[in-house]
Structure formats: C-alpha cells, structure tokens
Amino acid sequence: MSELDEIRMQVMWNRLISVVEEQALTLLRTAFSTSVREAGDLSAGVFDPQGQMLAQAVTGTPGHVNTMAEAVLEFINEIPREEMFEGDTYVTNDPWKGTGHLHDITMVSPSFLNGELVAFFACTAHVVDVGGRGFGADGKSVYEEGIQIPIMKFAERGVVNKDLIRILRANVREPNQVIGDFYSLSACNEVGHRRLVDMMREIGLTSLDNLSEFIFSRTTNAMRERLAQFPEGSWSNELMTDGYDEPIRLAAVVDMKDGLVNVDFTGSDPMSRWGINVPIIYTKAYASYALKCVLAPEIPNNAASLAFFTVSSETNILNAQRPAPVSLRHVIGHMVPDLVFGALAKALPGQIMAEGAGALWNIHISVRPVAGQSGQNAEVLMFNSGGMGARPALDGLSATAFPSGVHTMPIEATEHTGPVIIWRKELRPDSGGGGEFRGGLGQVIEIGAADNHEFDFSAMFDRVTQAPRGRNGGKNGTAGSVKLDDGTAMRSKGWQHVPAGKRLVLNLPGGGGYGDPAQRCAKAHEQDKIQGYVTEERQ
C-alpha cells in the first residue's frame, strides 16, 4: 500500500469514527429515559457484514460496547441473510445474547448500499422499566425480572412491529418512556446508516472490505507488538464483595502466553439465589476492558483487539446460566476490573491502581402519594458514583464512575422526573484511603419524597461490608452505608420503604490509597485539609 493510500485509509477511518459518534449523539439527543439522555448509559457502533466490530462511539460504557461486540453475531445467527431487508431493525434484551440483563435494549440494523449489505449498525440503551418486579435483586429467576424480548424484528422494511409495541405498553410501568427509547434506538442506527452511505458515495466505495482490512490488520499488528512487551506467566487474585445476604468471593487467574491473554474465573463462588448473577458475556466485557486499560489503552477497541482476550469459567456467579436472576449483574460485574487488576499487579508491580468503589450506586425509586392524598406516581432512576482508587503517581478521582464511565444525572433532571427532592449531594470527607497518593472520595446523598408522598426504593449498592483495598501500603477506602435520616440502618440491596417525612441517606465508599501514607508530600497533605477532603479528626 502506497503512502498516499495509507493517508486515504486513515482519512476514511476518521470519517468512520465521526459516523458512529453522530450515531451515539442521536441517541443522547432523542432518548426519553434520563439514564440515557443525562447519564450516557448507552453504546453505538458499526460492524462489517460478518458482524465484526469496526468502530465504536467514544460515548458509551464498556459493559454495553464489549457485549454489543458479541451480540451482533447472535443477531446474524438468528436472522437469515435472505430475511434481512433495507429498512429493517432487529431487537432483543436477552441477557445471554445481549448485555447481561433485561433492562438493556440492543438494536441492530443492516445497512445496504445499492442493494448490497455493506455493514451493520448496533446500539444499546438502559430503559427505565421492563416490568416484572422492577429493577432490583429480589427476583428468583429471570422470568420474574421483566418482559423478555427474543431476537426479533422491531421494524421490517421500515414498518414498525405494532404488536411488539402493544405488548410493551401492556407490560411496563412507564410505557411512553420505554417505547420512546425504542424509537430513539432505531433512529440512532438509521442516522449511522445514512452517514455511512453518504461517506461511501462521496468517496466512491462499494464496500468496506479494504477499509476493514486496513483497520483490522493494523490493530492486530499493534496488539502483537504491545503484548510482546509484557512478561508471560500466570497470576491470580481474589476479591470479596458484599453479596446480598452474605459475602461473595470472586476469583481470577490471568494467563499471558503466546501473545494471548486468558482470564479464568473458575473458583468464584456459586450462583446466587438473588438477582446479582452475571452472564459470561458481561463478565468478558469488563475483563477485556480491564486488560485493555493496562496493556493497550491507546489501541482502538474493535474486533481485532478484543480477539486477543478470552475468558473461561465453570458455572458460577460470573458465568450464570439461564434462568438465573441477573437484574443487578452490574453490581458484581463492575468488580471484575478490580479483580483482574489485582492479578496484573503481581505481573506489573508498581503500575496498577488501587481498588475503587467499583459498582455504580444505582437506586430505583417508586414514588407515590400517601394514601388519601393527591399527587403523582413516578419511577425515578439515579446513577451515583463512589471514589476511584489512587494511581501509582496520582490521587484517585472522586465521585467518578469507574469502570462503567456512566455519568451522574444532574439533580435538576432527576427531580424533574417525579416528586423527589435531593436535599444533599456532596463529597464525603475522609472516605478516600490514605497513601502517598490518596484514594478518591465518595459522596453523601440525601433523598426525600415531596410533601404528601412516600417511596419504595431498590438498593443496588456494594462496598458496604467490604471496603476497597489500598495497594503498595496504601490504606483501604472507607466503606459505604445506607440509612434513614433518623439513623435507621437499611440494607444495601433489595426493595425497601421510606415513609413520608423521612429521608434516605447514602454514604458512598471512597477508593483505596496507593503507597505509604508517610510518603505523601506536605503540600498535598495541606491541600487535603484546606479543601475539606480530610478533616482534623482523620489526622
């Protein structure tokens, strides 16, 4: 390939990135649910006709992006090529063929140019409700957790499946929001298709074959060169999480050999009877993300780079089998990066961050008027984040959603969705673990219902009994807590009630520290006190 051809391919690659970014922004602009519109709990990407991911949008979560990378192959296996038409859109929320739980809707659309299939576009978003018991860990099987949509057509030749819309409307608590998000997802793929076709016509392409070969061959070569720089071997780690009614042990063995990396989760605790189990597709998504963060962070995330990472496991909580309840698969799944990092820290001493809060502190609130009072019923979903672990040369980030990358919804947007009031949302002093580099701080969040209202809430919290661990002599972060404003302790998982006039107080965990606290520089120590990150009582 000549130098001019190389430049031309690079320009087309950049154009492809802009296509998927516009695809994702369409979903952000048109989504009905605040979890998508405000928090960015979504993914978008373009795939070749064989279902291999060419490019992903920067906007999106690893749990969505990396599961979507495999989900498109499931769609291709289910829907024969001769039944794919221009204007089609396919949909599923199957946890084992999609993104791990029923609340995530994945849509895939074929892209045709001059009658020929040239690509697929895919996107995923978390919707506010899918019926059943609601978003929570209390279901005993996936059948209790909501409506299940097998891989099927949302639209054929541009005509929406009205029967599916009617079924959705009859099964979910917020039909307008949910159905609106279905149309937003479909529009997201349609915009991607239009921009791709415009690009191909402008450049004079009839297929993406040459561009695909350019992207995949260079990604493969870059990955081989990068992995060759790391030692071969096998390293293990264990991590305890709160679980539902008892702690759960997660175990991983990372093997690097012959330029490939496998993570084996055999040895983790068995499946839970509660909805915190994780389908292997979601476990693999976050294991791959953790490996890529450490080993090849700047190499594009596509089918070629992901091919270097594999996972294995016997049936257990990280490889849950149907029909296990999986609604809160993210609570355990978000711990997978810290689990993998702990093994990599033995292979790469001095290069791996400390443990952080991990799982989002999601809360789903069902608010209603007190009996005999007038008011509004509403379903409100909030995403909140604890602190990240400290890094080998930097403090941890406070109130940051790592590893998911999901934003916290603005208070104004949350209060707009229903009669709830966020009375307090502030950084939590002393929550970051001490060290040469301090762990990131958690938050304090105080939530109440509006006058004459009460609410039930689904707690989806972790790191309450098992604090994030420091590394290389750093102190542990401070564990979280859940209580009412009168001091009544509440559980970290499951549906619970907050009476009218009471407030729920969430203390989110802070990240672990890195290095000996005695080595922290005096200036940084003084700044911690001035900014209120550390109080006098902590000294």
Image: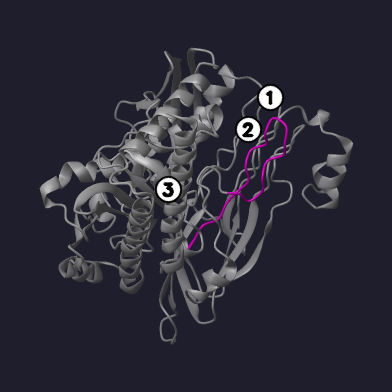
Can residue 507 be seen at all in this image of the molecule? yes
Chain-order first, disc 2 or disc 1: 2
Magenta stretch: give its range.
380-400
Residue bearing the label numbered 2: 354
Q: Is residue 240 left or right of residue 535?
A: left
Q: Amino acid at mark 1?
A: Asn
Looking at the magenta stretch, what is its main secondary structure?
Answer: loop
SS for dot 1 = loop
Which quadrant holds residue 152? Answer: bottom left
**Residue 179, which numbered label?**
none
Q: Quadrant of the C terminus?
A: top right
Residue at point 32%, 42% (across, down): 208
**373 above or below 461?**
below
Distance from the alpha carbon under mark 2 to that under mark 1: 8 Å
In whole angstroms, how far apart are the C-alphas of marks 3 and 2?
36 Å
Among the two numbered marks 1 and 3 on one chain, the one whose residue lies closer to the N terminus: 3
Q: Nearer the viewer, residue 29 or 373?
A: 29
Q: Residues within 10 Å of mark 2 (few under 14, many from 20)?
A: many
Which residue appears at 85% of the width and 34% of the height? 521
Q: Which residue sits furthest left?
A: 82
Q: Position of residue 340 (x, y in %)?
A: 50, 28
The answer to which of marks 3 and 2 sits earlier in the sequence is 3
- The image quarter containing residue 438 is top right
Q: Secondary structure at mark 2?
A: loop
Residue identified by numbered label 1: 472
Indicate the position of residue 35 as horizontal and vertical percent values: 46, 61
Give the labeled residue for mark 3.
16
User: In what quadrant of the picture does the N terminus appear?
Assistant: top left
Count residues near mark 3 (Cα–Cα under 10 Å), then give few for <14, some for 14-19, many for 20+: many
